[in-house]
């Protein structure tokens, strides 16, 4: 089975695609996956690092971009679609799935037009504009939240959760590793979060009394790395501050509490890794979808949520200290998070994709079909 995965831009879109690709290529040695994204997104670096083929198209966002960028995005659409058609014809996938991001729309529509079975994966509780449109055309819509079903034709929807990378799945069955200090993991997504970073630095003044028994691990993103480092040093904290954390599995495993944004992939990771969290939704997320994502954890008793505009360093510090000294509450939050975890999402989505292939092509998926030219070989995937 050959699968074309379209999308990226941020880790929230890309990492579920990587997780799904891992599941697909481990099922059969002849299965392969091709990613399509843009050169500006995280996918241009991360996809090749994970051993998958990457192709780029020219594509830009449309919603929330401002008038000039909207016009530029609209002008780019025809060329994006032509490039997408070329790639679908080149690789002749057995199924195409969009995981969100600028490239998802043109590629999924090109595949649909050429008769390839198509699907989309919507990570958030509130679907974006592109997925709402694509949902009218694709065969299957994979969702992470029950409340998202109402936006799509019910016969197409599968509420299976958000695919999680294999390295993180190990955490579902592991207890946290032993450590001497109460460890708080802080991150704002793959690109960082300036508002969250600033409030964490402000909170340090109110955490001085906890300094000797507190360990802080902070992913800042590239833009704020030096500023945040200086903030910790100025307050006398010996924190582990990094631009990007490559081994998130170890980071989750070694943490007692997570302070982060509320992107759908982050929510899925928190629930799979069974972590209590303080969520600060990105205030400019389209349709405020991060707040809706966060509410699902808050309602289950797995997280606290603060709006960024209302959050001060003092409030954040107070919440951290309260949970640090209330182990019973922290444990209850961890258990609540675990009940929401869906560690089988990748496998179940791959099952449906396989059924789409069988329904269209029968038992010859992944092979040369009668009347079809040989498809180009892609980079060898791992067995």
Image (tube, helix red, strand yellow):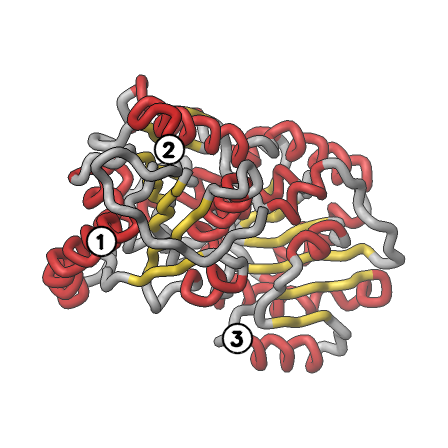
The residue identified by callout 1 is 84
Q: Earlier in the sequence, mark 2 or mark 1?
A: 1
Please, is residue 16 above or below residue 339 in the view?
Answer: below
- State the CA–CA distance, disc 1 to disc 3: 35 Å
The residue identified by callout 2 is 365
Residue 129, visible in the rendered structure? no
Residue occupying the point 28% across, 40% down: 131
- Is 208 in front, or is 192? 192
- Is 84 in front, or is 338? 84
The residue identified by callout 3 is 224
- State the CA–CA distance, disc 2 to disc 1: 21 Å
The local secondary structure at tag 3 comes to loop
Looking at the picture, how far across and down is residue 51, in whole percent? 52, 58
Q: Residues within 10 Å of mark 3 (few under 14, many from 20)?
A: some
Residue occupying the point 45% across, 30% down: 145
Q: Earlier in the sequence, mark 2 or mark 3?
A: 3
Residue 162, visible in the rendered structure? yes
Looking at the picture, how far across and down is residue 140, in whole percent? 33, 28
The quarter in which the N terminus is drawn is: top left
Residue occupying the point 77% across, 74% down: 238
Q: Report the side of 2 relative to 226 (left or right).
A: left
Disc marking residue 5 = none
Looking at the picture, how far across and down is residue 57, in whole percent? 26, 61
- Judged by depth in the image, the label closer to the viewer, 1 or 3, is 1
């Amino acid at each position: 089975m050959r699968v074309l995965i379209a999308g990226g831009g941020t880790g929230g879109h890309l990492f579920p695609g990587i997780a799904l690709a891992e599941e697909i290529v481990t099922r059969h040695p002849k299965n392969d996956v091709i990613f399509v994204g843009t050169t500006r997104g995280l996918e241009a670096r991360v996809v090749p690092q994970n051993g998958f083929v990457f192709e780029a198209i020219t594509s830009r966002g449309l919603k929330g971009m401002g008038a000039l960028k909207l016009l530029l995005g609209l002008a780019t659409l025809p060329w994006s679609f032509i490039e997408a058609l070329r790639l679908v014809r080149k690789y002749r996938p057995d199924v195409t799935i969009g995981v969100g991001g600028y490239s998802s729309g043109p590629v999924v529509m090109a595949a649909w037009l050429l008769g390839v079975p198509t699907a989309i994966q919507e990570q958030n509780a509130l679907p974006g504009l592109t997925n709402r449109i694509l949902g009218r055309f694709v065969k299957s819509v994979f969702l992470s939240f029950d409340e998202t079903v109402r936006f799509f034709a019910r016969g197409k929807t599968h509420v299976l959760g958000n695919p999680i990378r294999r390295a993180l799945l190990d955490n579902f069955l592991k207890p946290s590793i032993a450590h001497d200090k109460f460890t708080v993991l802080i991150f704002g997504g793959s690109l960082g979060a300036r508002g969250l970073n600033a409030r964490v630095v402000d909170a340090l003044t109110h955490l001085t009394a906890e300094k000797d028994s507190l360990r802080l691990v902070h992913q800042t993103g590239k833009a704020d790395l030096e500023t945040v480092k200086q903030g910790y040093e100025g307050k006398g904290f010996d924190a582990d501050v990094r631009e990007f954390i490559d081994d998130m599995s170890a980071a989750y495993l070694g943490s007692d509490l997570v302070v982060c944004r509320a992107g759908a992939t982050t929510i899925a990771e928190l629930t799979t890794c069974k972590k209590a969290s303080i969520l600060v939704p990105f205030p400019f997320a389209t349709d405020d979808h991060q707040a809706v994502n966060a509410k699902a954890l808050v309602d289950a008793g797995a997280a606290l949520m603060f709006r960024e505009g209302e959050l001060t360093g003092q409030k954040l510090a107070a919440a951290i200290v309260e949970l640090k000294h209330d182990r019973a509450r922290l444990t209850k939050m961890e258990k609540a998070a675990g009940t929401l975890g869906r560690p089988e999402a990748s496998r179940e989505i791959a099952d449906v994709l396989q059924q789409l292939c069988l329904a269209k092509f029968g038992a010859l998926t992944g092979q040369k079909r009668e009347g079809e030219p040989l498809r180009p070989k892609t980079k060898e995937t791992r067995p």
